[in-house]
Amino acid sequence: MIGRAAKFAAPLALSALFGFTAAAPLSADSSSWFTRDTETPVPKLAPSPKKPAQSSAPSNAPAPGGTSDIRKSIPSTVPATGDDAAYTAFDQGQYLTALKLAEEAASRGEPQANTLIARIYTEGLGVQKDDRKAFEYYKRASDLGDIQGTFALAISYAEGRGVKKDRKAAAELFEKAALTGQAEANYNLGLLFLKGDGKPENPIRAFQHIRYAAEKGLPQAQYDLAELYQSGTGTNADALEAARWLSRAAEQGYPEAQYDYAVRLIQGMGLTKDEPKIPILMKAAADKGIAGAQNRLAYIYFDGIKVKKDPVEAAKWRLIAKKNGFDDQELDARIANMPKADRQKAEAAASAWADRIRVDAGMAEGP
């Protein structure tokens, strides 16, 4: 059964903060996963599970032979019985009630209650957003032993949210959380070692932490691990391992992985058994707004790559990609030579797709 901490925790990629790449993109026109100007998600936090499970994570120093020591301790930070009321209220959107109950629990010294209060102030849920107050509560939670609070505090230092930016302090806190087995903390710590920001640049340590997070199922880490294997960063170059990890990230619905893996499959650089997935993966990435995937999908339908040729469907995706700023004069010329009726069908289909995406986005945002 998934505990509340797992339910509330959001994957967090510090890569969006750094603006760096581990190596060259997977293909010339693939999406750049570290250079996109994307706001780092706010961590969604709650108390640790009632029954902490044993986990392992890389330790501070590699063991002989290049592998890391493993630590398997998780601080016991289980809240007193009956104090789930604050989280129930939060789940129901009763934020002021949740805040009041969490403040009462925090006054009794309960670590996770401080983390919940901090999240309420971080996101401005029912109260005015206050990053400084959130930082103070995250720090209190961390000092009392709540690892989710420690993780959020690291983000505060990394972003300079409510406190002066301090990547060294962030690295120390990520390391503390990573030692309990938290996948996101290991991933972010690996990125710090990769960049040499807050930690000395160390590709081997970066690889170890990112691989750990990938093995725990974090799709961002699986995607990045594929690039580390492809480029031989922190490990021996291994194209087969790169393909395997890229495939795993794509299977989890990670858009950039779906796109890049589909491109690799077209180029004959993926797993042979996955080749029938080319149009499925490309369309999934296209539907999620990746312009390069939208444009590639046009070629797939024009050329009949693992699908029946469909010029109208091809033109539809080219029009969508063009509207999203992707330039391709060759495809534009092919569409210009299509019968007018087919072009009109494609335009109508592209417009219908855009309308559906807008409706879906509105439903996702809620009232």
Image (cartoon, rainbow, N blue to C red):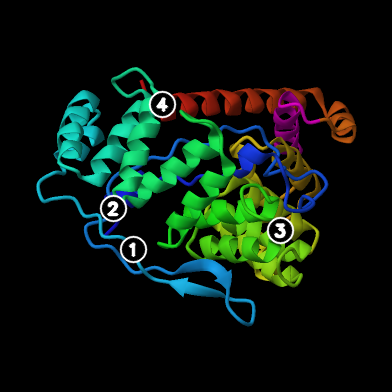
Residue at point 32%, 50% (across, down): 146
Q: Is residue 20 left or right of residue 39?
A: right
Percent x, y of residue 222: 59, 59
User: Which residue was labeled with disc 2?
Assistant: 48
Residue 8 within the segment the image draws in magenta: no
The CA span between labels 4 and 3 is 37 Å
Q: Secondary structure at mark 2?
A: loop
User: Which residue was labeled with disc 4?
Assistant: 132
The CA span between labels 1 and 3 is 31 Å
Q: Residues within 10 Å of mark 2 (few under 14, many from 20)?
A: many
Q: Residues within 10 Å of mark 1 (few under 14, many from 20)?
A: many
Mark 1 vs mark 2, foreground winner is: 1
Mark 1 vs mark 3, foreground winner is: 1
User: Which residue was labeled with disc 3?
Assistant: 227
Q: Magenta part of the protein: which range?
A: 311-326
* Three-letter amino acid code of the residue under disc 1: Ile
